[in-house]
Amino acid sequence: MENNRYDVIVIGAGPAGLAAAEAAHKGGAGRILLLERDNTLGGILNQCIHNGFGLHYFKEELTGPEYAGRFIELVRKTNVEVKTDTMVLAVTPEKRVHAVNEKDGYIVLEAASIVLCMGCRERTRGAISIPGARPAGVFTAGAAQRYLNIEGYMVGHRVVILGSGDIGLIMARRMTLEGAKVLACVEVMPYSGGLTRNIVQCLHDYNIPLYLSHTVTKIEGEGRLTGVTVQQVDENRAPVPGTEMHFDCDTLLLSVGLIPENELSGGAGVEMDRRHNGPMVYENMETSVPGIFAAGNVVHVHDLVDFVTGESQRAGAAAARFARQGPAPEGRVLEVENGASVTYTVPGKIRLANVDKAVEIFFRVNRVCGNSVIRVMAGSEQLAAYKREHLAPGEMERISVPRVLLEKADGCITVSVEEA
Amino acid sequence: MLDVAVIGCGIVGANVAYLLSQHKLRAAVFEKENDVSMGTTRANSAIVHAGYDPEPGTAMARLNVRGSALTKEQCAAFDVKYRQIGSLVLAFSDEEMATVRRLYENGVANGVPGVRVLTREETLAMEPNLSDAVCGALYAPSAAIVEPWDLALALAEAAVENGVELHLETAVTGAEKISGGWRLHTAKGDFEARAVVNAAGVEADLVAAMAGEPGFTTIPSRGEYYLLDKSQGYVVNHVVFQCPNRDGKGVLVSPTVHYNLIVGPNAEPSGREDVSTQADALAFVREKAVKSVPGVNFRENIRNFAGVRANTDQSDFIIGETAPGFITLGGIKSPGLSSAPAIAEDALALVAGAGVALEKKESFVHTRTKKRFNEMTPQQKAEAIRENPLYGRVICRCETVTEGEIVDALHRPIPPRTIDGVKRRCTAGMGRCQGGFCGPRVHEIIARELGISQQDVLKDRAGSYIITGTTKEGGLHHGE
Amino acid sequence: MANIICIVCPKGCRLAVDENTLAVTGNGCPRGAEYGKNELTHPVRVVTSTVRVEGAGICRCPVKTAGSVPKEKMFAVMDALDSVCLHAPVHCGDVALADVCGTGVDVVATRELPAAE
């Protein structure tokens, strides 16, 4: 009977899981198992064939597969065990992992610590209730990306893209380069959700118009999509009558948001934070269940994979420490609150005794801000302030707060943004 | 010459075919779409009604009550998902309580088991998430929810296994009286039969008109729905109706057999085939629904869809001969799903009356078992994988559906040929990601198992192609 | 006057570049002026795409131009890639197409694809 007990089990071998597994190895964990549902390592990066990855971490501009490849190489050099084609069905609060694959059948594994790295999934048409017919030709941008980049299929000729986040912008370029005509990118907010470089290199380069404060209000087509109606929206995001534009198209790509994939987290009894739709995590990426950690898009959806790597390494190292030494010291816990203009923070709680020199806090603003000050407050006392020239909801921010400053706080700190 | 030709393979046609298949005769079903259950059967509230709605003494009342009882037996025999969760008709005023009491009297007269009127307190005790404004309710414990497209499929497959011929993508375009029966003109040639059963749903009047005077007109009425994530499935435990109105049974809130939440439908005039959703109709559904259950979280919606009811200018079902030997089952609106097995019995009596001898076979397929990986215990899962390793490859992450189940479905008597055909049989793609993850994988499996190219795999109906070609072929618009 | 957005850093300064004099205004730093000038005189881009591959289990291998190529040659580069077919095993960095469209830049594979069993 196979020995099913591990020090650390990492669920998901995308950039988060790869970094966590390697960090757990560096952290001295003995038996580490990396579980991946696909037949290959790398996760979503395998289909992100465009560049722009690794500018922070490697100081190079890499494509998704190249970035993944660096970490796959690192993991291969370790004794981390890898099971691909393996779907985890459940994680229990007792840290048992139930999984299936063709070869091993139904397996139940035990671990001293677990790192959840399942990533995220795409919001669908139903999430925004676009009215109209239900023809073929409506794809989420990621699903279309998989067809094109992994399977080598074209999904359509005349395309409208709903959503100007990076995935929508990237697919606008990709479809155009592969010979499709992209008629428009439609964005419900008054600003784009994607990086400026993508607006330039994916829309401007190909003269693809961007319609801000617009949305798709009707989908037409019997078997296959034949067209969509696009309308302006008001400040309540309600369609404005009389502003209808019609596009003849056979393809609609939806880039309308990503949701952390937390089916397994729920079953593990992990406390969720509704503000970022992922597990509440402490300063070391540990969840509310001792020994269960989480990192990457499963916690909060990232824009830069470099940040995913950083927090996943933190999670992996902490998972290894937990396996070797047991729970982190509890002591004083600071709740991290989101203040003015801030949607959420990760971590949600900080155990001061577990902080080395500083805590990295990630957050997002809920509106575009010009020259601003990020303030970390303990009640009415300011602990730290950081200047920024530009902040946007589509660009996750990172600040590093020294421990000595946090020690002045009692119970709760607040991260807020104030525009000058 | 066939003994019987059945037109339409929705829940009614499938029931008729199944009953015919139990007898020593030659029968065929002609279905215009590329799969069974493609009409109203797959786009309705999925409720097996208790039977208090129809007027006592009508065919509808008799057929609803008998049909609901038969449906329960069928679901057990064919391993079709069925949950007898009971239903409540809510009253929000004294006037509506009077309606509730009238429905109660109806129920008693129609022989509906266990109906009773609940006080406000009893109603809220049964359903804590209802609006405080509720005054009372009619409770019918025999109401149930079901998976209607699978029920029709199971019956149709049994019919096929028993020898009935199924002709898909074979629309009937005309009918001609000939000596000893009828000649049907179809998209795939002519077929002759001694008797014809017209179960063409929304188009039953048009098909009837091919043979004679239909005596009724279909007035299509579309109903639109929200289908919410399983995280909302706990919100109610029963089917929760509002008082019926002129247009129908009104907006309901109900769990589904898959533990999702379904909300809807409205009722609006529509084209016969127009199953598109409209912004104002969806808004109406939401507004009505929160009157019953204020806390429904529509941000958890995963899908909207619509179905068209075969309403007519008459209130009852229209079951009879359009012309000698041409039997029409018309106006099968709600409670059509619930009544279908009983309607089929009436149809068979008319078939016999038309001179077709009904000699029962000694044995015939009357059961089905279905392997559902997501319902298995760990031991059962382990065994399933040992028996067939493809059960160890999970394809649909949201619903935990394996390649084994999908491959098995592709080799059933009525195999799916489309993404949605697989979805209806295996639930792959019904979950919260709506096929975003499993779609390309299911696509590949269909092509492989059926020996066709991926480009030829459709999403659903004719014309619903998914991919247009391969990359690296040279594009159409370079720099335009 | 060409109005473009600078992409050198996330600030995204709105630049105005005079097509004749190539004078740049609106830039927040010298790098922006450089970018603005280049975008009008010889704009360049890195092209990422896929090529056919055989023997790897999957049938597309991601590739990129190893450096920037003239923007006006992007579609020509795409066309040239249509006729490339790699054979597994493919290593990251393997040249898929040398000196694509006479740019002096190679197109290289960006993914490790072992030979399938």
Image (tube, rainbow, N blue to C red):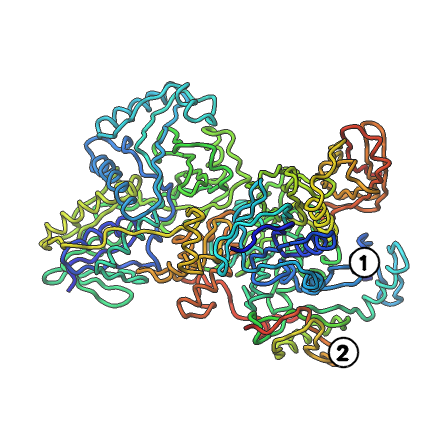
Name the residue nearer the viewer: A157 or A388. A388
Q: What amino acid does circle 2 point to? A: Thr
Local secondary structure at mark 2: loop
Residue A400 quadrant: top right
User: Which residue shows up at 73% across the image and 41% down it?
Assistant: A367
Position of residue B69 relative to residue C87, above or below, is above
Task: Tell me the SS state at disc 1.
Answer: loop
Residue beneath disc 2: C103
Q: How far across and down, in percent of the image, does residue A242 sit? A: 58, 45
Above or below residue B206? Residue A201 is: below
- Chain letter of mark 1 equals C
Point out residue B41 in the picture as x, y percentages from the top left corner.
34, 48
Q: Is A392 or A239 nearer to us in this picture?
A: A392
Quadrant location of the C terminus of chain A? top right
B315 relative to B136 in the view: left or right? left
Residue C6 tag number: 1
Q: Which mark is residue A138?
A: none
- Please tell me how crowded label 2 is: few (under 14), some (14-19), or many (20+) other residues with Cα within 10 Å: some
Front residue of B135 and B324: B135
Q: Amino acid at mark 1?
A: Cys
Judge the density around disc 1: few (<14), some (14-19), many (≥20) Cα neighbours within 10 Å: many
